[in-house]
């Protein structure tokens, strides 16, 4: 039987154990603090990331995987018996990851590699990788695997609640005075994915009201459709994630298995510690 391997990157936020269960290879995003580099999933996670940020009082930089890193993943998949590869990358609107994967694929002339720009972030991309892997395990052909992944990406709704604007101020994306005022008046921004980018959707005063609004947005995005998958996302805030899951699953019928996932450092550095959110895959 034709064997199709699924490759993605760590910005998909897929927990390692789930990726391993489906045989999904994740190419890591790298985080740089001055001359020191750290590999997502190997020697840095969200908790360690913000320990370092709070200690050093500055944000690190991040870099997309190199074409060589994708080449290694592709070679590993072919060596393990894959006949073809479907590679799903974080949105090209926020990262050079897609370009790196395309460049890597061109170093395998005659090999069957399809690289997909997910136009998604975090578990939006992760759900696409899961859909592709499930289709491959069911014996679907390459075209159907790609189709399932792309269709899944169009049905994902992602919302996240920032705990503070401090880290956006550190990045320069928000002025320090504005961030300080927002924190003083307990203003909590809600983010969503629009056109492949993580964008500010609303600013809500008080965390309680912001959580209520987050749940309203989740409910309206489903709008009577079947909820196929749910992932609760967080940045070093597992208690907040559990609370959000409890509230969300009272609001709508959650599937039997809800994924809890870290945002992961490549994305978390832009959002800040304490974030909670959700990715919902609604039925077609």
Image (cartoon, rainbow, N blue to C red):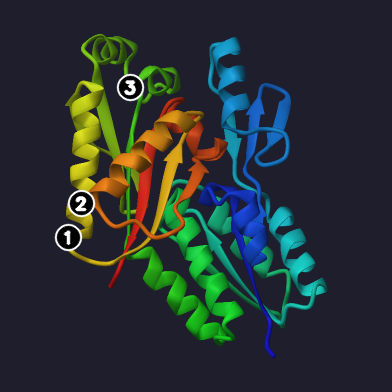
The one of 65 and 78 positioned closer to us in this rendering: 78
* SS type, badge 1: loop
Look at the image and tell me whether residue 60 can be seen: no
Q: Which mark is residue 212?
A: none
Look at the image and tell me whether residue 200 can be seen: yes
Residue that badge 1 annotates:
223
Residue 232 location (% of width, % of height)? 42, 45
> For this view, does 204 lie left or right of residue 120?
left
Cα separation, mark 3 vs mark 1, equals: 33 Å
Residues under numbered marks 1 and 2 in contact, where contact means CB atoms less than 8 Å apart: yes
* SS type, badge 3: loop
The one of 49 and 70 positioned closer to us in this rendering: 49
Residue drawn at (63%, 25%) of the image: 48
Cα separation, mark 1 vs mark 2, equals: 6 Å
Residue that badge 2 annotates:
219
The one of 68 and 148 positioned closer to us in this rendering: 148
């Amino acid at each position: 039987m034709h064997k199709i391997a699924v490759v993605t990157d760590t910005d998909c936020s897929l927990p390692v154990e789930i990726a391993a269960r489906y045989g999904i290879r994740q190419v890591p995003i790298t985080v740089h603090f001055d001359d020191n580099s750290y590999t997502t999933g190997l020697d840095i996670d969200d908790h360690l990331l913000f320990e370092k940020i709070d200690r050093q009082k500055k944000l690190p930089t991040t870099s997309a995987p190199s074409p060589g890193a994708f080449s290694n993943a592709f070679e590993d998949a072919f060596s393990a018996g894959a006949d073809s590869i479907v590679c799903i990358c974080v949105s090209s609107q926020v990262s050079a990851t897609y370009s790196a994967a395309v460049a890597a694929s061109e170093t395998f002339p005659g090999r069957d590699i399809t690289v997909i720009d997910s136009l998604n972030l975090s578990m939006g991309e992760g759900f696409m990788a899961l859909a592709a892997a499930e289709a491959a395990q069911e014996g679907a052909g390459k075209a159907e695997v790609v189709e399932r992944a792309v269709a899944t990406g169009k049905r994902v709704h992602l919302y996240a609640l920032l705990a503070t604007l401090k880290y956006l101020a550190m990045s320069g994306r928000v002025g320090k005075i504005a961030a300080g005022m927002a924190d003083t008046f307990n203003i909590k921004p809600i983010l969503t994915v629009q056109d492949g980018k993580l964008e500010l959707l609303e600013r809500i005063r008080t965390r309680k009201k912001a959580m209520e609004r987050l749940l309203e947005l989740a409910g309206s995005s489903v709008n009577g459709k079947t909820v196929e998958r749910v992932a609760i996302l967080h940045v070093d805030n597992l208690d907040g994630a559990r609370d959000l899951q409890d509230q969300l699953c009272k609001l709508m019928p959650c599937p039997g298995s809800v994924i809890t996932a870290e945002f992961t450092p490549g994305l978390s550095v832009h959002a800040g510690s304490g974030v909670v959110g959700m990715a919902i895959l609604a039925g077609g």
